[in-house]
Image (tube, rainbow, N blue to C red):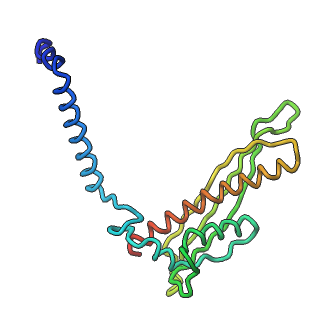
Amino acid sequence: MSSSDLGGFRRFPSLRRAVSRAVTRGLLALAVTATAACGFQPLYGDHGIGAGASEKLHSVDIASIPDREGQKLRNLLIDRFYESSRPEKTRYRLDVSVTAVEQKLALQKDASAVRSQLLVNAPYRLTDTTNGQVVFASSSRSMISYNILEQHYAGLLTVENAYDRALLEISNDITTRVAMHLGRGS
C-alpha cells in the first residue's frame, strides 16, 4: 500500500473501528480454538477432566499431621476436600508432613535482623487404600517474608500470621493438585 492509500483509510474512522473490531474478534476466536486444541479443560465444571472434582476429593481421607502447624494444615485441607460432612468410606488416604525453616534477612550493624523469611515445605502422597499403592506423590512449598518487631507479643503474632499464610497457600496447592490427579481418572 502506498501512503496515499493509507490516507483514505484515515479519512474513515468508522471503517477503521470496524476493521479493528473484526481483527480483535478473529484473534479471540483463534485463541479460544487454540486453547481447546491444546487439551485445556476446566477443573471444576460439569464436563471434561475435572467433572465432579468435589465428589472425587470426598473419597480422600486426610491422615493426621503432627505438630500445631500440621493440625492447622489438616483443618484447612478438610475444609477444602469435604463440602459438608466427613466421608465414612474412602478410597484414598492423603499423608502430609510439614517442615519449616526461618531465615533471618536484612541484618543491621549489631547483627540483629529486622526481616525474616519463612520457608514451609509439605511433601505429601496419595495412597490407594484398596491395594496400598502410592498413586500420586509431590511436594508443596511456600515462602513468606515478614518484619521482625521489637515488641514481643506483636512479634509472636507476626510469625504466627506468616505460618497461617504459608499453610493457606499450601492447602490450596495440595487441593488443586490432588483434584487434578483424581480428575484424570486414576
How many numbered callouts? Answer: 0
Residue 18 location, x and y as percent?
18, 32
Q: Quadrant of the N terminus?
A: top left
Residue 129 image offset from top left, x and y in percent? 53, 84
Question: Closer to the camera, 103 or 178?
Answer: 178
Hey, which residue is sitting farthest front in the picture? Answer: 14
Q: Is residue 1 above or below residue 44?
A: above
Q: Quadrant of residue 69?
A: bottom right
Q: Residue at x 82, y 42 (%)?
A: 149
x, y percentage for residue 3? Answer: 14, 12
Q: In percent of the image, x 75 and y 44: which residue is there? A: 116
Q: Is residue 66 above or below residue 85?
A: above
Image quadrant where one finds the C terminus: bottom left
Locate residue 171 relative to residue 11 in the image: left or right. right
Q: Residue at x 15, y 17 (%)?
A: 6
Residue 98 x/y as whole percent:
68, 64
Residue at (66% x, 66% y) in the render: 73
In the displayed structure, 39 sits above or below 13; it is below
Task: Pick whichever, 85 or 74, lies toward us.
Answer: 85
Residue 44 located left or right of residue 16 = right
